[in-house]
Image (tube, rainbow, N blue to C red):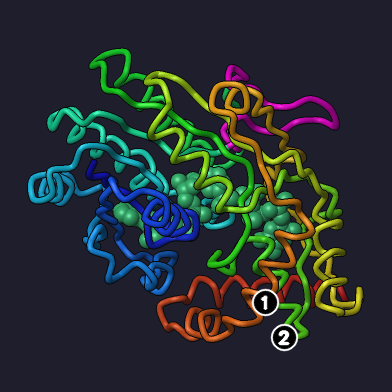
Amino acid sequence: MKVLVTGGAGFIGSSFVRYVLRMRKEIDVVNFDLLTYAGNLRNVEEVAANPQYQFVRGDIADETQVENVFEQHRIEAIVNFAAETHVDRSIEDSRPFLRTNVEGTRCLLEQARKHKISKYVQISTDEVYGSLGSTGSFRENSPLDPSSPYSASKAAADLLVLAYYKTHRLPGLVTRCSNNYGPYQFPEKLIPVLITNAMEDRSLPIYGDGLNVREWIFADEHSRAVLLALERGTPGEIYNIGSGHEKTNLEVVGEILRLTNKPESLIQFVKDRPGHDRRYSIDCSKIRREWGWSPEMDFASGLATTIEWYRTNQAWVREIKDASYLSYYDRMYTRRDQTLAVLDS
Ligand code: NAD
Ligand code: TYD
C-alpha cells in the first residue's frame, strides 16, 4: 500500500514515518511536507535512503500540488499530520492556521475523493474538546468547544472529514490525541523549551500559576496508535488517544529540573496565555477495547529519554535556533524577556 503522509518532516509525523518503515515492509511512504519553520529533513534523515520512502516538498493547501502528488505516486491512503500547531502562534496570527489546517484538509479530501483512496486518517487533538475542571475526561462524543484559533481550526478540519464521510462516503476517520513529547519536538512547545533552556541555564517560563494540567504521551506511542487507525480504524469514527499521565506544568518543570540537576530559581512565572485551557484529560478506552492498544512508556522514563536526546543532539537544536527565518521564535523570547522584566520591577 502506498501512503501519503503529510507533515512527515515535523515532530510526530517524522516519528510515524520512522515507525511505519521499521514495522511494515508492505507500506510505501510518500512524505509530503512544505518544510515550514517546523519541518526539518534532519528528522527523517535515517529513512532518507530507504527504498520504501520518498520525499516531496509541497503545500496541502495548494490543490494543484496535491493533485500532482496523487497523479505521480498512485496514492492509496492518507495520514494527515500537516498543520500549524502552536497555540501561541495562532493567538498572534490565525491566518496560516485557517489556510493549512482547514483549507489544506479540504484540498486533501477533494483529491482523496477524486482518486478513490481506501483510507484517510485525520490527526487531530484533544484540544478540540476545550477545557475541563478538576474532574472528568473527554470521550469521543464530548461536545466540541475549542478555545484557541489553533483548536478551532482543528475542530473545523475534523468536521470536514466527518462530513465528507457522510456526504461522499469518503473513508475518513479522526484520531484525537493528548499532548505529545519526545525527541525532535520543536523548541517552542513546553517540554523542549524547558529542557533546552535548562541546559543553557536560561529562565524557564511558566504561564500563569503553572497549575494547568496536560496529559503527556510519548510521540512514538501516538505513532503506534495511528498505524492501528490506518489498518483497523472504521471510517466515520473518532478515536481518542491518551496516556493517563496527567501533570501540572509545575510538576513537569520540577521533574525536568530534577533530571537536569538545575535549581528551582530558573523558574520564571510569566503572563498567562489568553484563553488558556485549564485541564485536558482523555478517555481512550475505545482504542484499548477495539485495538488492544495501551501506552507502555511511563512519564519519568519518557522524560529521561527525551532529555538525553536533547543532550546528545545539541547540534539539531543549535541549527534551529540559529536559522535566520526563525524571527518569530526570537521575537517570542524577546517578548518573554520583556514580560519578565516587567514582573521583576
Ligand atoms: P509540527 O509543527 O512539529 O509539524 C508540522 C509539520 O507540518 C511540519 O513538518 C510542517 O512543515 C508541515 N506543514 C505545515 N504546513 C504545511 C502545509 N501547508 N503543507 C504541507 N506541510 C505543512 O507538528 P506536530 O506537533 O508534529 O503535530 C502533527 C499533528 O499532530 C498536527 O496535526 C497536530 O495538530 C497534531 N497533534 C499534535 C499534538 C502535539 O502535542 N504536538 C497533540 C495532538 C495532535
Ligand atoms: P504547549 O506545549 O504550547 O501545548 P498546548 O498549549 O497545545 O497544550 O503548552 C503546554 C502547557 O504549557 C500549556 O498549559 C501552556 C504551558 N506553557 C508554559 O507554561 N510555558 C511555555 O513556555 C509554553 C510553550 C507553554
Residue at far front of view? 25
The quarter of the image holding the C terminus is bottom right
Residue sitting nearer the eye, 84 or 294: 294
Amino acid type for the residue under numbered disc 1: Thr
Asked whether residue 296 appears in the rendered view, the answer is yes
Which label number is shown at residue 196? 1
Q: Quadrant of residue 302?
A: bottom right
Classify residue 262 as left or right of residue 280: right
- Magenta-colored stretch includes residue 135: yes
Which label number is shown at residue 280? none
Classify residue 127 as left or right of residue 264: left
**Helix or strand or loop: what does disc 1 sit on?**
helix
CB of residue at label 2: within 8 Å of ligand 2?
no
Q: Position of residue 271 (x, y in %)?
A: 77, 60
Ligand 2 position by quadrant:
bottom right
Residue sitting nearer the eye, 186 or 87: 186
Amino acid type for the residue under numbered disc 2: Glu
Which residue bears the numbered disc 2? 200
**Helix or strand or loop: what does disc 2 sit on?**
loop
Image point 86% across, 56% down: which residue? 251
